[in-house]
Image (cartoon, rainbow, N blue to C red):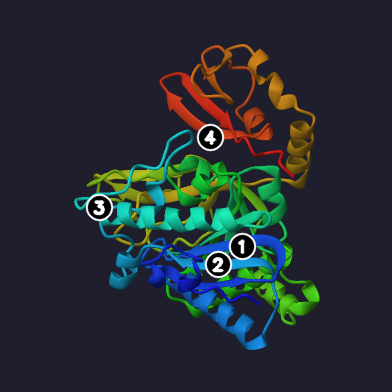
Amino acid sequence: MDRATPHSDPLPAGDAARLVGCLRGARAGATVVATAGIHGNEPAGIEALERVFAALDTRGMELRGELVGLRGNLPALARGERFVERDLNRIWPLEGEQLPPVPGPAAAAEEIERWALMEQILAIEERARGELHFLDLHTSSADGCPFFTCGDTLRNRRFALRFPAPVILGIEEQLDGSLLEYMNERGHITLGVEGGQHHKESSVRHHEATLWIALVEAGLLAPEEVLELDAWRRLLAAASAGVPRVMEVRYRHAIRPGDGFRMVAGFRNFQQVRAGELLATAGGEEIRARESGLVLLPLYQGLGEDGFFLGRRISRFWLVLSAVMRKLGLHRLVGLLPGVERHPARPGAFRVNTSVARWFPLELFHLLGYRRLRWKKNVLLVSRRKYDLVH
């Protein structure tokens, strides 16, 4: 096996500390890239990567393709803080935007980290010998079971549903500037992994399980080559027992600087809440659940832009129906609906005048793959990922 090192050009020179490991098999295959520590107070993914690379090395396992593990925000990791100046997971270019030029001496720490990561991603893309799968490993401040997030494309769904843990659709669509959204727009299969609570050993184990399963599902290893594969699957399944298999995000509570957001104590990921239930306070006002559902990623740390999310279960029927509708190309008929017009400057996007288009629900856009929703007065902007139907 060709064991790449910082000196055999797996990564740009001068950034060796970012590399957790890089194993490139002699046979061509898919590439799996995993980032961890994008937030500096989330080291569990890094430890999991180190364990997996150590096991691969000890066992002399031959990969079909390449596995790369990268540390994210090095200055924030050194401090053990979420970020230094800006959230590294909120500053990636949006759809149609270009990465800013090389940061100058006055640039924020996270702008420098973003550029360094992008250099490495470009190098990995250039030498890839097959499909690229991108995993971003995270943990949260609240307790709860592991789960996965993915942009709602059919191929992302197929990959995510191979892991025996809950899958949440629509989180990335609620956020601007996330790394996963950026990689999805570059045409790769993407998967966000929430391993559990910060600094718990169980979170490291959940990330380990995810990485081993990913190596098998992406084709880098055969199932029989990972002797503990069934045990890893059972670990994830047991940790998330009783939680709905697939959910969608219905609401994100964004935190404004200085508003004094404080989550009510005791909420866990996937805890059922009722409409009107008190969830948090901010600026002296109570924040109550807009609808009944499941609370996701409640914030119990000092830094962050997301107070909580609310989600609901999606049935298998809905998933099958949406796949059929997309494969039939019914998304091409959206522009014929009353009150809907193509966006003049954004291919694949539509503007919806909600004062006219009152008679059909927003769920119709979700079924057809239009999940990026932005409001401007009574106009709703929806867009569809260009890689939805790539096989």
Residue 19, placed above or below residue 152 = below
Q: Earlier in the sequence, mark 1 or mark 2?
A: 1
In screen coordinates, is 114 left or right of 374?
Answer: left
Q: Check disc 3 and report its element: helix, strand or loop.
A: loop
Q: Check disc 4 and report its element: helix, strand or loop.
A: strand
Q: Return the x and y of residue 174 as percentages of the image width and height.
A: 48, 41
Query: Which residue corresponds to mark 1?
Result: 32
In screen coordinates, is 323 left or right of 167?
Answer: right
Q: Residue furthest left?
A: 106
Q: Quadrant of the C terminus?
A: top right
Nearest the eye: 193 or 59: 59
Q: Return the x and y of residue 304 as percentages of the image width and height.
A: 34, 54
What mark, if any, has residue 372 been given in the picture? Answer: 4
Residue 288, placed above or below residue 43 = above
Amino acid under disc 3 = Ala
Q: For the residues marked 3 and 1, what is the alpha-carbon distance in whole angstroms?
A: 29 Å
Count of labels in the image? 4
Q: Earlier in the sequence, mark 4 or mark 3?
A: 3
In screen coordinates, is 339 left or right of 302?
Answer: right
What's the residue at 61%, 83% (across, down)?
57
Query: Which residue corresponds to mark 3?
Result: 108
What's the residue at 55%, 44% (across, down)?
186
Q: For the residues marked 1 and 4, what is the alpha-carbon distance in whole angstroms?
A: 26 Å
Q: Check disc 2 and report its element: helix, strand or loop.
A: strand
Circle 1 crowding by C-alpha within 10 Å: few under 14, some 14–19, many from 20: many
